[in-house]
Image: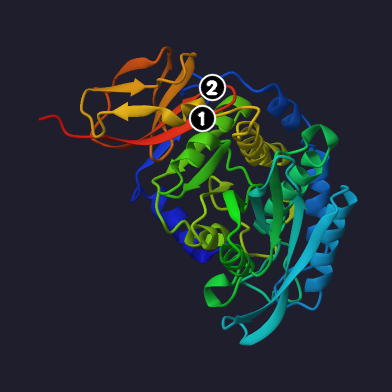
Amino acid sequence: MKNSILLFLVLMQTSLFALNTVSENETAVQGEPDSSIVAAIALIDNDSLYSYVYDLQNMGTRFMIAPNRRDVATWIMNKFLSFGITEVRLDSFPAHITYMYDTTTWQYNVEARIQGSDFPDKEMVMIGHYDDVTQNSEPISGAPGADDNASGTAAILECARILNQPEYQPRQTMVFLASAAEELMYYGDSGTEHYAAEAHDAGRDIVMAINNDMIGWDDGTWTVQLFNHIGSPEITALAIDIITNYTTLNYLSSTPVHDVGGDIQPFIDAGYHSIYFMENSINPNYHTRGDSIDYLNFNYMAEITAIGLGCVLQTDNTVNSKKYPNHLLNLKILPNPATNNVTIYNPDNKLTHSLKIYKLDGTQQISQTISGSTANIDISILPPGTYLVVVSSETESYYSRLVVAPYK
């Protein structure tokens, strides 16, 4: 995990950023859980998560220029292959760093792909960097990195194991990226910089990127941090919906920014919609030889793993297809900007739909059911600002920004 993210957390925790803390008991009206998502989350195995972290920790070090770096990547590749995933590769690239050392080495991302059945060109990417570092001792000789970031790597491995089972054949392509060279990315080249740039240049349609970094240490609040990109409010809203309906976690949702940092930033810079999950407080063993498996809570890690798993399944379940044509495409929200009321026009569909309005940090403001081709919505409780409107049924969703103007 980057030092800039550590600084960002410190700033947030000293109230220099506006935050919204919400527990599952304080959340507004919840949706009806999807049985397929419930079933998939039930397959998350704490023992599996433990075994991945244990094996990664016991490699001694995963520092980016250590002699075993290719061996670490090969172990992760073989783990993906053991799940029956056939499209797995080492994505090698040269990386130059200027901190601690001044050198160029070959680095190895590990990419596993489960091809989508209906929309193979649409991709959802789950990320967890596998390299680690210690700052108070020589990282080449020892850096266990259990929380930072064997925990995030374990999450993507477990999601890959579950999603490659026959009952979860995805309609879109699922990509699991164990990325290299994250820890010193601000002093050189990183795996996600290389990967996201190549994806952009190739014109790949990555519809969502999710980063897991340090998700194993619970500070006693049972809370997950959501680092939100200002251009991806629908993903923040989706993550909060999954947390609310499928986990027992509380969440802390930061004010959306462009510079989220860490391994997700290169995807944002490449134009992809993204979110970043992290534990609530910095593990006190962060970047030390004390970052061991003994201090991790695997029930907590499983809950955060469930968020990413739920997000990709919900997105995959509702992707448009010939079987489920999107009748909401002609929906209009007028006026926009608005003050006290808006009218939703949906001339092509008279079914009952769920309407939710969120702040851009993902906190829900309004939730109600609408039906018919016209619905008038009272928005007088909303302060002036920009919001996200989500109108959805079981098979489709419509997203729109709504600007609430000051009342004159």
Q: Is residue 198 visible?
A: yes
Residue occupying the far bottom of the picture: 102
Dot 2 alpha-carbon crowd within 10 angstroms: few under 14, some 14 to 19, many 20 or more:
some
> Which residue is label 1 attached to?
397
Give above or below for 123 relative to 395. below
CB within 8 Å, label 1 to label 2: yes
Q: Quadrant of residue 403?
A: top left
Give percent across and percent down for residue 206.
59, 52
Residue drawn at 70 percent across, 22 percent down: 35
Locate residue 201 relative to residue 110 in the image: left or right: left
* Apparent side of residue 115 relative to residue 395 in the rendered image (left or right): right
Secondary-structure class at tag 1: strand
Q: State whether residue 291 appears in this view.
A: no
- The residue tagged 2 is 393
Residue under the image location 78 percent in, 72 percent down: 69
Which residue is nearer to you in this view: 206 or 288? 206
Figure check: 250 above or below 187: above
* C-alpha separation, residue under disc 1 versus residue under disc 2: 6 Å
Identified by mark 1, the residue type is Ser
Tell me where residue 287 appears, x and y as whole percent: 62, 64
Q: Residue at x 74, y 59 (%)?
A: 111
Helix, strand or loop under label 2: loop
Q: Indicate the quadrant where residue 60 lies.
A: bottom right
In the figure, is residue 60 to the left or right of 222?
Answer: right
Residue 327: which disc? none
Q: Is residue 350 or residue 51 the one in the foreground?
A: 350
Q: Position of residue 211 (x, y in %)?
A: 60, 52
Disc 1 crowd, CA 10 A, few/some/many (<14, 14-19, 20+):
many
In the image, 34 versus 346, the foreground residue is: 346
Q: Nearer the viewer, residue 281 or 175?
A: 175
